[in-house]
Image (cartoon, helix red, strand yellow):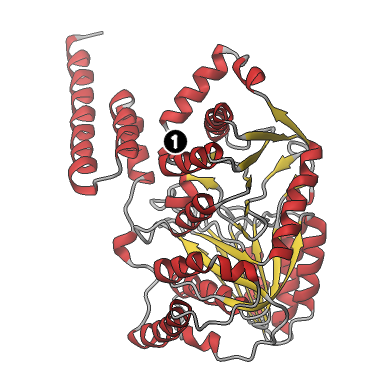
């Protein structure tokens, strides 16, 4: 190598490290990330400076200052007034709860009201789906029977038989004059192209992409790459709502050779909680599409009381410094007296959740965590094994689901309160993705979800301490590296 080339290469690395140093100062003194995330970024920036700089550009942006979901002054006045009236009634012990579970967990209801502006409704009926074919049969049937409006948002819609069937069904309803709004995440649904939605638009339907790339045909060159809309929600005629973990594609019907059976959980709701799902959709739609819609209008329509299940719809995302869904999980865990059942494909908790679960175990609470037997994101899988191994040593019971891929995202506590939604039990869902979960306060509905968990145990292998200790040096290495990067996964 010539002296000139050597000098040029040396200068190149000096420049890379200088840029990395400036980014490091930004992370520490300006962004003020939490210590674990900051250390993870510093590790990447100085070990692989070129790659670290690129990852920082695409994956590390604080977007909460942008206030992407803005409310008008009128909306603030209307919604705050209604929420304050409900919260005050609960605090004064004047609110009449429909069941004992809701009454017992009213402090958690207040938490979600004050921390996330989440209304509490208790006239809801719930149908639980754990089979993709049944869920999509129900959804497509409800779409075909829609009379007025369909608001639908998914993280992933695949260009396959199921994805095309959904788009076709939406197009047919648009032709009938039904108001159709179709929102998809630009990265998660990158297989979907405008040409596939042309007929929907011609029929009068509307569609939008959440955080699309600046350059339309370079879908991976997206400065919002790390912030994805992971929600899966549908509202039909303002009367029927869907929320949960299923995306749209053949693999979610169990037709993937790689994953086989797909085990997930989704809810179909009827009652006033549907209005809250609709409000969440319209906030996202208004930002992504630019359509000027008045949010309180969704609360003016008539909603038929359908049951007595208490529900709060809680959402979170990087648009806020708060971690609303995580805080609800913490409240459930720290208040548990009997049992905690968690199903999640990715178990990468932060220190607060680990300590809360550890405290629950040592307090005599039956803590059970169910994870898949196979990875769909390698680093996350090894980090998951690391964290469940830690809790296994504390006395938690760990179950490895072996009948295909477990994608369900449920938390059940004491047979009284449960959560079902899009949020995984990991740092990415708590801080980086836009998520939405339904929190249920009802003994009968939570009993169903706990029974499903116990039924799934028949398809699991329980991980033992002795088995975990026998893992190879290579697996231990993978766990250690993945754990270091937990805040970035």
Quadrant that contains the N terminus: top left
In this rendering, position of residue 74 left or right of residue 127: left
Residue at figure coordinates x 63%, y 47% from the top left: 339
Q: Where is residue 222 in the image (x, y as percent from the top left)?
A: 42, 51
Q: Quadrant of residue 144?
A: bottom right
**Residue 233 can be seen, yes or no:** no
The correct choice, above or below, for 120 with respect to 405 in the image is below
In this rendering, position of residue 318 left or right of residue 441: left
Residue under numbered circle 1: 486
The correct choice, above or below, for 339 with respect to 348 in the image is below
Outermost residue toward the top? 1
Q: Which of 481 and 254 is in front in this view?
A: 481
Q: Position of residue 441 (x, y in %)?
A: 62, 66
**Residue 3 can be seen, yes or no:** yes
Q: Dot 1: within a 10 Å radius of its alpha carbon, few (fewer than 14), some, or many (20 or more) residues?
A: many
In this rendering, position of residue 228 left or right of residue 462: left
Q: Where is residue 361 in the image (x, y as percent from the top left)?
A: 56, 38
Residue at figure coordinates x 51%, y 24% from the top left: 479
The correct choice, above or below, for 147 with respect to 364 in the image is below
**Secondary element at image label 1:** helix
Number of marks: 1
In this rendering, position of residue 347 left or right of residue 40: right
Q: Which of 36 and 282 is in front in this view?
A: 36
């Amino acid at each position: 190598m010539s002296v000139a080339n050597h000098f040029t290469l040396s200068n190149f690395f000096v420049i890379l490290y200088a840029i990395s140093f400036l980014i490091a100062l930004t992370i520490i003194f300006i962004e003020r990330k939490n210590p674990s995330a900051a250390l993870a970024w510093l590790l990447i920036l100085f070990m692989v400076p070129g790659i670290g700089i690129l990852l920082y550009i695409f994956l590390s942006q604080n977007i909460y200052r942008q206030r992407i979901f803005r409310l008008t002054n009128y909306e603030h006045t209307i919604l705050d007034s209604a929420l304050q009236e409900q919260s005050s009634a609960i605090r004064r012990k004047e609110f009449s709860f429909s069941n004992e579970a809701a009454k017992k967990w009213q402090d958690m209801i207040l938490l979600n009201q004050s921390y996330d502006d989440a209304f509490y409704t208790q006239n809801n009926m719930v149908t639980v789906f754990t089979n993709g074919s049944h869920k999509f049969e129900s959804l497509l049937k409800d779409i075909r029977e829609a009379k007025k409006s369909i608001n639908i948002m998914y993280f992933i819609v695949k260009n396959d038989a199921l994805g095309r069937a959904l788009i076709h069904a939406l197009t047919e309803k648009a032709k009938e004059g039904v108001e159709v709004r179709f929102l998809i995440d630009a990265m998660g649904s990158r297989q979907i192209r405008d040409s596939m939605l042309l007929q929907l638009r011609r029929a009068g339907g509307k569609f939008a992409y959440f955080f699309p790339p600046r350059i339309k045909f370079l879908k991976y060159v997206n400065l919002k790459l790390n912030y994805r809309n992971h929600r899966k929600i549908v509202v039909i005629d303002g009367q029927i709502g869907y929320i949960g973990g299923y995306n749209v594609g053949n693999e979610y019907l169990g037709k993937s050779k790689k994953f086989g059976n797909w085990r997930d959980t989704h809810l179909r709701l009827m009652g006033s909680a549907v209005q809250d799902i609709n409000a969440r959709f319209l906030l996202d739609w208004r930002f992504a599409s630019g359509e000027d819609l008045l949010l309180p209008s969704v609360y003016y329509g008539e909603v038929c009381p359908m049951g007595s299940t208490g529900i709060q719809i809680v959402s979170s995302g990087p648009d806020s410094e708060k971690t609303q869904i995580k805080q609800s999980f913490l409240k459930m865990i720290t208040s548990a007296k009997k049992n905690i059942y968690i199903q999640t494909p990715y178990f990468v908790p932060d220190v607060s959740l680990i300590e809360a679960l550890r405290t629950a175990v040592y307090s005599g609470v039956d803590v059970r965590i169910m994870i898949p037997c196979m990875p769909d994101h390698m680093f996350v899988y090894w980090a998951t094994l690391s964290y469940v191994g830690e809790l296994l040593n504390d006395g938690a019971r760990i179950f490895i689901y072996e009948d295909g891929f477990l994608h369900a995202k449920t938390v059940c506590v004491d047979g009284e309160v449960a959560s079902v939604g899009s949020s995984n039990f990991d740092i990415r869902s708590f801080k980086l993705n836009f998520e939405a979960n339904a929190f249920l306060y009802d003994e009968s509905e939570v009993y169903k979800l706990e029974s499903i968990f116990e039924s799934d145990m028949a398809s699991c292998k329980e991980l033992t301490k002795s088995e975990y200790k026998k893992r190879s040096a290579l697996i231990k290495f993978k766990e250690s590296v993945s754990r270091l990067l937990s805040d970035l996964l």
